[in-house]
Image (tube, helix red, strand yellow):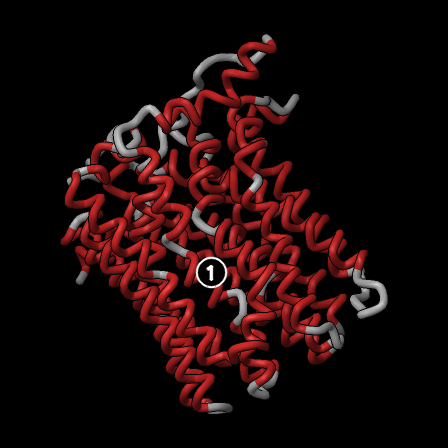
């Protein structure tokens, strides 16, 4: 047991945890928490689910991620490229969070809320760019599994804590105070960057001064990725593997509200049950990754995440059931915790260390773009048309293409062929 826990206590893994805390909180405030806020303010389901289109800002981040790789911030750059950007974007996220706290959503004037949500999405997406680059370049190849696990611990704890703090403060004060208080969750990543310093695996290609060099810095990450054997199939897998999971996860709070669960009940089960299930899932994911390797552990994760949607179909069929809610949240968090370790480790290993920020931005954006688009454009209408039970059954079926595609890529050797230097350079090799 001691040998299994020791890798999680290495300084690089602990840094990944605190980075994850800050990465998770903007997502929580835009997803489940904003859904609860809008529902309680009388906004209809179709409008609420359309708010998930604010997440499209996250999917556009590959178009400006190159800035984090190549543009130096005057004065602050003395602290390091990654550290300086972490501080600047962290302050941007805090300001955007307070801005969303100040709006007043109403059916007759939803525009300011939409603008504030998009602004927080822009800030959160930019924060993710530098956080992911910092994490990948700090971790050695053999630490990608445990580091990804700790990042998932942090992400889930940051998201759950921010969501719970917001719900509890909203019940006792108001939504303005609830959102404003959550701005402090940006601090862990900023402090971590300052304490750890510039990542040792960060590679600078060249100074980007000429116009042609700027263009190369934009196109280079994409050109390098698509030169690899199997790159287009890898991209297809990235696009389709999480459709069902995204559709389900972004609609949970609608289900909870319609089943009559209170804010306190949601906070209790999300943290009291979901947290511990996540802890177990992440730990199991790290152990299975170390013992079975990247490929088989990812395949298991894909199956678990697909099956987890069935638990919410069962909850929808059962109605308001505290035991049913505990079971559904518990299984979903276990599957997500396990999958978060191994899938994030795989995506991290796909990066070339010369273009970490840009390539991981492309990968992470592609992983959710289809699901977010479908959620924002069709989820509310589908729920109203077919009901929650059939909707969650549909999300389970939507996960099958990703499982089949990854299995075929394993057999064809394309998982190894498309690996980047982040999975190879340094101690260990993610392909083993």
Considering the numbered disc 1 on the image, is that residue within a helix, a strand or a loop?
Answer: helix
**Where in the figure is residue 78, as x and y percent of width and height?**
57, 22
Position of 362 with respect to 164 (left or right) is left
**Where in the figure is residue 183, as x and y percent of width and height?**
66, 56
Instruction: Count every numbered label the image shows and give the total.
Output: 1
**Residue 276 seen from this side:** no
Residue at point 57% right, 63% down?
A: 378
Q: Nearer the viewer, residue 221 or 237?
A: 237
- Residue occupied by mark 1: 246
Which of the 4 quarters of the picture holds residue 259?
Answer: bottom right
**Where in the figure is residue 194, as x and y percent of width and height?**
52, 37
382 up-or-down from 118: above or below: below
Q: Nearer the viewer, residue 193 or 313?
A: 313
Q: Quadrant of the N terminus?
A: bottom left
Residue at point 59% right, 8% down?
A: 210
Q: Nearer the viewer, residue 402 or 31?
A: 402
195 up-or-down from 228: above or below: below
Which of the 4 quarters of the picture holds residue 99?
Answer: bottom right
Which of the 4 quarters of the picture holds residue 79?
Answer: top right
Residue at point 35% right, 62% down?
A: 337
**Where in the figure is residue 82, as x and y percent of width and height?**
51, 31
**Residue 173 seen from this side:** yes
Residue at point 42% right, 70% down?
A: 394
112 up-or-down from 263: above or below: above
Position of 57 with respect to 388 (left or right) is right
For label 1, count other residues whose C-alpha is less than 10 Å away and answer few (under 14), some (14-19) or many (20+).
many
47 up-or-down from 353: above or below: below
Q: Quadrant of the C terminus?
A: top left
Residue lying at the far front of the rendered structure: 385
Position of 431 with respect to 119 (left or right) is left
């Amino acid at each position: 047991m001691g040998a299994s826990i020791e890798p999680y206590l290495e300084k690089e893994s602990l840094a990944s945890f605190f980075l994850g805390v800050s990465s998770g909180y903007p997502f929580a405030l835009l997803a489940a928490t904003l859904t609860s806020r809008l529902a309680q303010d009388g906004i209809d389901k179709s409008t609420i689910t359309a708010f998930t289109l604010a997440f499209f800002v996250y999917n556009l981040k590959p178009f400006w991620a190159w800035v984090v790789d190549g543009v130096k911030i005057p004065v602050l750059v003395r602290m390091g490229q990654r550290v300086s950007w972490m501080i600047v974007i962290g302050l941007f996220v805090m300001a955007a969070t307070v801005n969303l706290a100040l709006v007043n959503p109403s059916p007759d004037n939803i525009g300011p809320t939409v603008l504030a949500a998009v602004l927080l999405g822009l800030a959160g997406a930019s924060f993710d760019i530098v956080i992911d680059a910092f994490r990948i370049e700090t971790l050695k190849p053999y630490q990608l599994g445990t580091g990804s696990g700790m990042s998932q611990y942090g992400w889930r704890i940051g998201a759950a804590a921010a969501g719970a703090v917001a719900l509890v403060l909203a019940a006792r004060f108001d939504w303005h105070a609830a959102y404003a208080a959550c701005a402090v969750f940006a601090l862990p990543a900023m402090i971590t960057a300052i304490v750890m310093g510039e990542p040792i695996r960060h590679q600078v290609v060249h100074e980007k001064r000429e116009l042609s060099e700027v263009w190369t810095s934009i196109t280079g990450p994409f050109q390098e990725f698509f030169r690899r054997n199997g790159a287009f199939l890898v991209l297809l897998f990235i696009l389709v593997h999480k459709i069902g999971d995204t559709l389900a996860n972004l609609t949970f709070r609608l289900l909870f509200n319609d089943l009559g669960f209170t804010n306190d009940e949601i906070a209790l089960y999300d943290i009291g049950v979901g947290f511990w299930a996540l802890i177990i899932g992440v730990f199991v994911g790290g152990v299975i990754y170390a013992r079975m390797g990247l490929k088989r552990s990812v395949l298991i994760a894909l199956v678990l995440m697909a099956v987890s949607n069935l638990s919410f179909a069962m909850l929808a069929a059962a109605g308001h059931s505290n035991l049913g809610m505990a079971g559904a949240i518990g299984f979903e968090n276990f599957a997500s915790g396990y999958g978060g370790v191994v899938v994030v480790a795989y995506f991290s290993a796909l990066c070339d260390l010369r273009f970490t920020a840009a390539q991981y931005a492309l990968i992470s954006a592609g992983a959710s773009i289809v699901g977010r688009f479908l959620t924002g454009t069709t989820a509310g209408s589908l729920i109203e048309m077919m009901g929650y039970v059939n909707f969650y059954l549909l999300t389970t079926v939507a996960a099958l293409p990703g499982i089949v595609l990854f299995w075929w890529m394993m057999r064809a050797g394309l998982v190894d062929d498309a690996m980047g230097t982040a999975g190879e350079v340094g101690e260990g090799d993610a392909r083993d």
